[in-house]
Image (tube, rainbow, N blue to C red):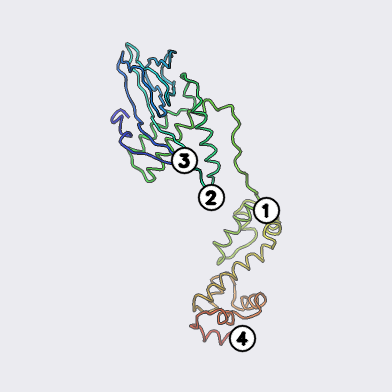
């Protein structure tokens, strides 16, 4: 950051985190030359100060505190303070100024994919920041590293630039708050119903591979359970057997092809895991009470395979 210490200040970075809007006003490295003093002042936003090198002093209200490498302190909103570097040793500061404003919460029922948990974490973090003791503390969780990460992102301009920068800023907030919230109980992360989860994984694997040979043992291995356990999961969660479920998935795919294409039934059978067309005819008629060709005609399928349909009718 020594090359362009104010590079991140040029970015207008704003984002939503939970029910808060975060606007980064400044994110930079500054160096106070020996004996330099910034007189008493205050900010309406949060100002995070981290000392990566050197030493000095901060006066918060009427209380002076010594500063040295590895410490951080938070000022604002509206905390009056004065900063000064050591008379002989320059003091470096990594500074983050950001506005944190409440936003309208998401409508009830609109939350998904962890949004509720993120809202809770953001609320707990901001509440902790609002009540931090007005005195320096050790940067126990290395929030300073997130400054360097943000600068590296700016320098490299990687894919996901905006999202990565947002994550770096959020890390500074979280790691700062964590120093004072380390003893608080962690929020409960929603737990999965593992039987339902494994059923969903197995179902998706079957959907993705229904045209290929599938066995109970193969799918069980993919979801990391025994074949016997997977069979029990299909019975309890899916109210079916593994074999019947695979067959139903394949038949659904066959029906889609029959109504949307004019491909021959023999080709459709082979594409969807039926080893022979005759086996498909038997299973299909048992399931739907008609042949594939009749299903195609009944459901408005293409007439492009009429010759094939006549051959099937003769066979049936």
The residue sitting at 54% across, 45% down in the picture is 114
Residue bearing the label numbered 2? 110
Distance from disc 2 to disc 3, alpha carbons, whole Å, reads 15 Å
Compare marks 2 and 1 and give the one earlier in the sequence: 2
The residue sitting at 39% across, 45% down in the picture is 160
Asked if the residues shown at circle 3 and circle 1 are in contact, with their CB atoms under 8 angstroms apart, the answer is: no
Q: Secondary structure at mark 3?
A: loop
- The location of residue 311, given as percent across then percent down, is 56, 87
Asked if the residues shown at circle 4 and circle 3 are in contact, with their CB atoms under 8 angstroms apart, the answer is: no
Q: Secondary structure at mark 4?
A: helix
Compare marks 3 and 1 and give the one earlier in the sequence: 3
Distance from disc 4 to disc 3, alpha carbons, whole Å, reads 69 Å
Residue bearing the label numbered 1? 226
Asked if the residues shown at circle 2 and circle 3 are in contact, with their CB atoms under 8 angstroms apart, the answer is: no
- Where is 311 relative to 203, above or below? below
Camera-nearest label, 2 or 3 = 3
The residue sitting at 56% across, 48% down in the picture is 108
The residue sitting at 65% across, 75% down in the picture is 283
Residue bearing the label numbered 3? 103
Residue bearing the label numbered 4? 315
Distance from disc 1 to disc 4, alpha carbons, whole Å, reads 41 Å
Q: Residue furthest top?
A: 87
Q: Secondary structure at mark 1?
A: loop
- Where is 155 relative to 86, above or below? below
């Amino acid at each position: 950051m020594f090359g362009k210490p104010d590079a991140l200040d040029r970015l207008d970075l704003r984002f939503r985190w939970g029910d808060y809007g975060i606007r980064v006003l400044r994110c930079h490295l500054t160096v106070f030359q020996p004996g330099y003093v910034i007189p008493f002042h205050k900010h309406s936003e949060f100002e995070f100060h981290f000392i990566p090198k050197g030493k000095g002093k901060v006066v918060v209200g009427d209380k002076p505190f010594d500063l040295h490498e590895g410490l951080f302190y938070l000022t604002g909103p509206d905390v009056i303070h004065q900063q000064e570097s050591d008379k002989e040793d320059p003091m470096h500061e990594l500074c983050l100024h950001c506005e944190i404003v409440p936003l309208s919460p998401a409508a009830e029922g609109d939350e998904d994919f962890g949004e509720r948990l993120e809202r809770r974490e953001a609320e707990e973090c901001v509440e902790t920041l609002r009540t931090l003791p007005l005195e320096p503390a050790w940067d126990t969780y290395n929030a300073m590293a997130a400054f360097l990460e943000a600068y590296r992102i700016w320098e490299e301009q990687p894919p996901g630039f905006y999202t990565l920068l947002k994550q770096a800023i959020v890390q500074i907030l979280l790691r700062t708050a964590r120093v004072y919230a380390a003893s608080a109980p962690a929020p409960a992360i929603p737990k999965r119903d593992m039987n339902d989860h494994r059923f969903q994984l197995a179902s998706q694997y079957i959907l993705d591979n229904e045209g290929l040979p599938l066995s109970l043992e193969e799918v069980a291995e993919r979801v990391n359970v025994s074949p016997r356990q997977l069979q029990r999961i299909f019975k309890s969660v899916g109210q079916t057997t593994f074999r019947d479920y695979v067959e139903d998935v394949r038949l659904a795919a066959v029906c889609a092809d029959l109504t949307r294409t004019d491909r021959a039934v023999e080709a459709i059978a082979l594409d969807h895991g039926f080893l022979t067309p005759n086996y498909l005819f038997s299973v299909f008629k048992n399931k739907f009470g008609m042949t594939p060709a009749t299903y195609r005609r009944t459901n408005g399928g293409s007439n492009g395979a009429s010759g094939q349909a006549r051959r099937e009718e003769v066979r049936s």
